[in-house]
Amino acid sequence: MAKTKSTTTRATRTTAETPQVVAQPEANGQDKPGRLGVQKTYKLYIGGQFPRTESGRYYRLTSADGKLAANICRGSRKDFRNAVVAARSAFHGWSGRSHANRGQILYRIGEMLEGRKAQFVEELVQLGSTREQAENEVFAAIDRCIHYAGWCDKYQQIFSAVNPVASSHFNFSVLEPMGVVSAFAPEETGLLGLVSAILPAIAGGNTIVILASESRPTSAISFAEVVNSSDVPGGVVNILTGLRSELKGHFSTHMDVNAMIYCGNDPALSKELQINSVENIKRLRIWDHQDWSSSEAQSPYKILDLQETKTTWHPVGI
């Protein structure tokens, strides 16, 4: 009787204090009979840590079969401001790293994602993807990590230039990261679109605060766990969950954000973000790919989209 009472008490306490998600299935799809599975809590990822939202709010996420899949944190303005502070603090150190070192770290993200691919496949299947679609998305995300890792020490040579001038000077154009980037991940893909927005930003030395897909957020927080264990300094990548309608103004008007990525094709939202971004001359990049697995969605020009061009003059003979 004592054992039965203890099990009941634990279940009640879990439901009352941390009503975050349902139990995760084992690899064979079955929980061990008589065992209460450990529930996963999907939190935010800010500054290398996993805090709960300061608002204490969450929204219910249902699985493809209509059952409760998770209670997802509804990030607030305060959460976003905390993430921007963390991103700004991390920017100097991250942009100052060698390009080769940034490439090594992005490659490490791919390695860690490869080791956990089965978990990501299950999370995508839970939210409505077929197993084949989920596997293709996870494999494409892993390959994209390796793709941008390879570009880290090459984009400067491709996009920089020695410019012809009429005077006796050398004239060089080189790239520098913009700074802190805010982003809305694609709504229709939980992992691949998120990765496709994060990687070109950090490959070029920027730091990022990104809002995960509202309908497919679980793999975004699991990806944060991968980032956290992949030598990425805290604050370089910050991942929030919540409602886009509540956060769009904060993401596009914050005065310490230098650029914004909008992954979508809503004309009304695009116009609103463009108007808001004018307040501090924030660069707005609209990536409206219909197919995030295409080669266009992993173009090195996405790194260029988030760079400033610095031109320097040097007299010949000095």
Image: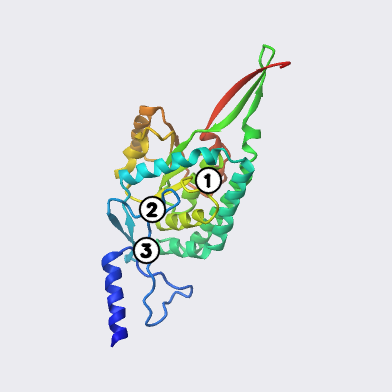
- Name the residue tied to disc 1: 199
Spatial separation of the CA atoms under disc 2 and disc 3: 23 Å
Q: Nearer the viewer, residue 270 or 26?
A: 26
Residue at the image point whose x is 49% and y is 39% from the top: 91
Spatial separation of the CA atoms under disc 1 and disc 3: 29 Å
Foreground mark, 1 or 3, reads 1
**Can residue 264 be seen?**
no
The residue furthest bottom is 1
**Can residue 127 be seen?**
yes
The percent coordinates of residue 81 (x first, y second) are 35, 41
- Name the residue tied to disc 3: 64
Foreground mark, 2 or 3, reads 2
The percent coordinates of residue 86 (x first, y second) are 42, 43
Label 2 element class: loop
Residue at the image point whose x is 46% and y is 54% from the top: 224
The residue furthest top is 167
Q: Amino acid at mark 1?
A: Leu
Label 1 element class: helix
Q: Quadrant of residue 8?
A: bottom left
How many numbered circles are shown?
Answer: 3
Foreground mark, 1 or 2, reads 2
Q: Are marks 1 and 3 in contact (CB under 8 Å)?
A: no
Label 3 element class: loop
Q: Earlier in the sequence, mark 2 or mark 3?
A: 2
Residue 44's disc number = 2
Task: Check disc 3: other Cα within 10 Å, few if <14, some if 14-19, many if 20+.
Answer: some
Q: Earlier in the sequence, mark 1 or mark 2?
A: 2
Residue at the image point whose x is 62% and y is 49% from the top: 104
